[in-house]
């Protein structure tokens, strides 16, 4: 699938058929999108679609479906960067980058640096082959599901095929009744700073001489590593960091930083049930009584320092680790000075005097409601002490200066994501037939369509006012009381927009006898001649649980009311004659879009 022109049509990968997506009919596009996850690779020249909203939507759908997408940015502008972050959630000064959505909440980014245009497709082909092999291995089940969290693993792919992890970014929403925050975790693993010159240069024509009129001693007197997070009109707060300052000049360091987060209220153990059941109960509850889900977020760092100490200092939203050399070693390359040229030696030079690596970690806090851009800057640098001597006729001239080198990479995050909402983002799926999902239409109508988690029109969240908010439009699901049709409207405190789950049925708070049901691809809330609503009793222990064990079939004489926290009592014998089975058209289930799902 291609947006724009390939770098070189002559080197297109033979295992792929080049198909232009921009003009592809929607039906054909959806059919190809439903193919096996790795059956295609998308190529996106972002400059070719920057003003084409339909093409951008297609690119976003391909990425969300789990197919790898090769991005070409070429020249970078603010507008292009915003378009890239709207599709992938993250942007940078990429030349080429391969984006692969491992799960709803985990995104791997492979930066392709140093490639000629004609070689990049071949490199991507090898990388995609590796991804296919990795897909065959089962992934470890996450600690739990339900946390609003996004993870970006940014890797460097160079022409020699070596892969080095550059940075790991986690964005986490932590919200309870009394507080609502977003946290951005940054871990470099590691950042390596290598001086362009280090060691000694011996001039002249003697043993070991270069034949040049230059003697030099080059020694990094300090290294620097930086993390910075900036946001629009907000100053992020530094919550935690590692490593801490250490005045020693020879030490080994290892530490695990652990922080706790939670989402929801104080319920969670009141209804009991399995972990999966509790997550479902949480997703069916309005946020202000949502189940308390706690999460432990850990990052481990280790490294060795020799001949340099470490000083951590914060300046606003920037944290800098300075590593100055032991003062006693500042002249370690100069054995002695003479009347002529100095005697230089590398005998006491250690590895860190040539390059330094540091695993570093910061955790930053932003307001939970913030949905703008957040820019991460990862930097490294060093102060190179440069001492040089040369002959000027019969005199020795010398120079002693310190050269300062700094470099940084920036990544911009789009924090307006359905995976970072307070309320769980879900697909609402009918139990009838193939199980289509509730979707908002362009005309503010609501219908049932084939489920697609990549389609934000099908994503909903139950807010603190019992309203289902559509993630694409931010409009609320509403019942039209004149005919029972389902529509979306601007959100308001209105009973027509408020809903309550009872077991697997969704009841209207405008009229509690009304409930959602499917009529082919249409949605209704007022029963017609084809639908019978009975006053099905609630489970007194947990209204979100089924009322009797054989539900949705009609109750039987030996049925019990399920109770996760104690004995399950037998139902009243009167129920056997009073209640019938529940029509599948009024039954619903939810698919949760969160970490681990």
Image (cartoon, rainbow, N blue to C red):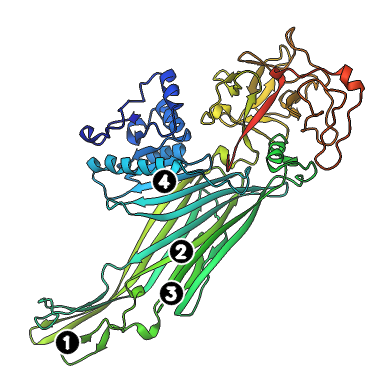
Q: Residue 346's x, y, as percent?
A: 26, 81
Judging by the rendered image, the residue that carries numbered circle 4 is 109
Give the residue at x 52% y 28%.
Answer: 455
Discs 1/4, front: 4
Q: Marks 1 and 2: which is nearer the front?
A: 2
Q: Residue furthest bottom?
A: 339
Say which residue label 1 marks: 341
Q: Earlier in the sequence, mark 1 or mark 2?
A: 1
Q: Look at the numbered disc 2 and give the secondary structure of its residue.
A: strand
* Label of residue 359 in the image: 2
Q: Nearer the viewer, residue 491 or 551?
A: 551
Which image quarter holds the N terminus? top left
- Return the disc, 1 or 4, that comes first in the chain's sequence: 4
Mark 1 vs mark 3: in front: 3
Which numbered circle lies on residue 216?
none
**What residue would you read off at disc 3?**
305
Taking depth in this image into account, of 374 and 434 the one nearest to the observer is: 434
User: Residue visible at 40% across and 79% down?
Assistant: 307
Give above or below for 567 relative to 384: above
Q: Give the residue drawn at x 85%, y 36%.
A: 568
The C terminus sits in image quarter: top right
């Amino acid at each position: 699938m291609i947006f724009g022109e390939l770098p070189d049509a002559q080197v297109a990968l033979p295992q792929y058929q080049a198909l232009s997506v921009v003009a592809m009919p929607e039906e054909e596009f959806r059919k190809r999108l439903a193919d096996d996850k790795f059956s295609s690779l998308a190529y996106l020249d972002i400059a070719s679609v920057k003003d084409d909203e339909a093409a951008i939507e297609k690119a976003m759908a391909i990425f969300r479906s789990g197919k790898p997408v090769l991005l070409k940015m070429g020249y970078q502008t603010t507008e292009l960067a915003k378009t890239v972050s709207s599709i992938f959630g993250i942007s940078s000064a990429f030349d080429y980058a391969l984006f692969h959505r491992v799960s709803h909440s985990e995104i791997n980014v492979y930066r392709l640096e140093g490639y000629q245009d004609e070689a990049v497709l071949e490199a991507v082909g090898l990388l995609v082959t590796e991804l296919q092999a990795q897909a065959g291995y089962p992934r470890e089940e996450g600690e739990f599901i339900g946390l609003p969290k996004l993870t970006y693993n940014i890797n460097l792919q160079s022409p020699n095929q070596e892969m080095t992890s550059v940075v790991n970014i986690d964005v986490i929403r932590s919200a309870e009744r009394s507080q609502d925050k977003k946290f951005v975790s940054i871990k470099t693993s590691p950042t390596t700073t290598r001086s362009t010159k280090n060691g000694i240069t011996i001039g002249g024509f003697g043993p070991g001489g270069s034949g040049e009129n230059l003697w030099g001693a080059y020694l990094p007197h300090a290294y620097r590593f930086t993390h910075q997070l900036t946001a629009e009109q907000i100053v992020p707060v530094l919550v935690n960091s590692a490593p801490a300052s250490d005045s020693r000049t020879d030490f080994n360091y290892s530490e695990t930083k652990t922080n706790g987060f939670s989402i929801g209220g104080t319920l969670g153990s009141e209804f009991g049930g399995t972990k999966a059941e509790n997550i479902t109960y949480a997703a069916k509850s309005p946020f202000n009584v949502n189940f308390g889900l706690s999460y432990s977020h850990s990052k481990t760092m280790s490294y060795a320092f020799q001949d340099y100490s470490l000083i951590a200092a914060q300046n606003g939203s920037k944290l800098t680790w300075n590593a100055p050399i032991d003062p006693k070693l500042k002249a370690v390359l100069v054995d002695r000075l003479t009347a002529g040229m100095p005697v230089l030696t590398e005998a006491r030079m250690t590895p860190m005097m040539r390059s330094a690596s540091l695993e570093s970690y910061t955790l930053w806090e932003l307001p939970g409601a913030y949905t703008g851009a957040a820019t991460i800057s990862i930097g490294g640098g060093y102060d190179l002490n440069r001492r040089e001597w040369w002959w000027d006729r019969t005199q020795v001239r010398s120079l002693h200066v310190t050269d300062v080198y700094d470099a940084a990479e920036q990544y911009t995050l789009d924090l307006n994501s359905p995976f970072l909402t307070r309320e769980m983002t879900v697909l609402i799926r009918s139990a009838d037939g193939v199980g289509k999902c509730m979707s908002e239409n362009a005309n503010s109508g609501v219908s049932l369509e084939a489920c697609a988690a990549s389609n934000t029109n099908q994503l909903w969240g139950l807010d603190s006012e019992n309203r289902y908010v559509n993630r694409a439009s931010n409009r609320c699901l509403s019942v039209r009381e004149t005919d029972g049709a389902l529509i979306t409207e601007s959100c308001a405190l209105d009973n027509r927009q408020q809903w309550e789950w009872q077991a697997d049925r969704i009841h209207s708070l405008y009229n509690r006898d009304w409930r959602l049901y499917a009529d082919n691809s249409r949605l209704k809330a007022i029963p017609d001649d084809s639908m019978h609503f009975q006053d099905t009793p609630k489970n007194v222990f947990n209204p979100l649980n089924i009322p009797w064990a054989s539900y949705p079939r009609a109750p039987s004489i030996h049925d019990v009311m399920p109770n996760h926290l104690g004995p399950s009592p037998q139902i009243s014998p009167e129920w056997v004659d009073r209640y019938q089975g529940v029509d599948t058209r009024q039954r619903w289930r939810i698919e949760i879009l969160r970490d681990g799902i």
